[in-house]
Image: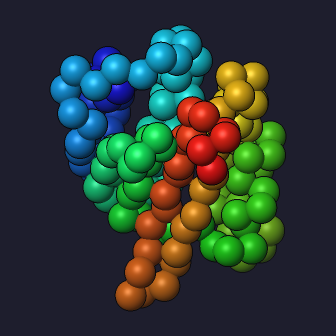
Amino acid sequence: IEEVCATLAARAAAAGLHIVNAVPAGHFLHADRYALQIVLRNLIGNAIDHAAPARLAIRLEGEALILADDGPGIAAAELPFVFERFHHGRLVDQTGTAEATDADHGLGLAIARRVCEQQGWLIRVTSATSAAQHGTRFELVFDENST
């Protein structure tokens, strides 16, 4: 987690995303390091591109790794589609045209989900967009039997 956060620190700072890694130093997880790096890069990169300026907290809850931001959130109607390839729900303006950028190709969350599936991990997302409560939470469960 620290390594991925360090590689994305400059990009996050430029976008206004403050990353807080609350996972205890020295915590060890028996998992494919490369697969976890791919998933984390995509989830943190997504927060940089879509939640910033915001705060992203990374923490453990039981057997799950939580990445939760306090950004604008994802509309409820878009949630079922966020893991689909080339989905640009939050980038579609009122005329229905996408404002895709070089940094956003609509593949990050699809890649994250696919890697999780290959590893036997579960990835879930919840989000809120109201003025009173907003933000997005991704949950990685490394032992699907503990859900």
Q: Is residue 93 left or right of residue 53?
A: right
Tell which of 23 and 98 is nearer to you.
Answer: 23
The residue shown at (71%, 53%) is 82
Coordinates of residue 52 in the picture (x, y in percent): 38, 54
Q: Is residue 122 left or right of residue 11?
A: right
The residue shown at (44%, 67%) is 135
Tell which of 31 and 92 is nearer to you.
Answer: 31
- What is the quadrant of the N terminus in the image? top left
The residue shown at (55%, 13%) is 32
Can the viewer see residue 130 in this picture?
A: yes
The residue shown at (67%, 40%) is 145
Q: Is residue 30 above or below residue 57?
A: above
Residue at the far left: name it: 25
Count of labels in the image = 0
Q: Is residue 45 left or right of residue 17?
A: right
Coordinates of residue 134 in the picture (x, y in percent): 44, 74
Residue at the far front: name it: 145
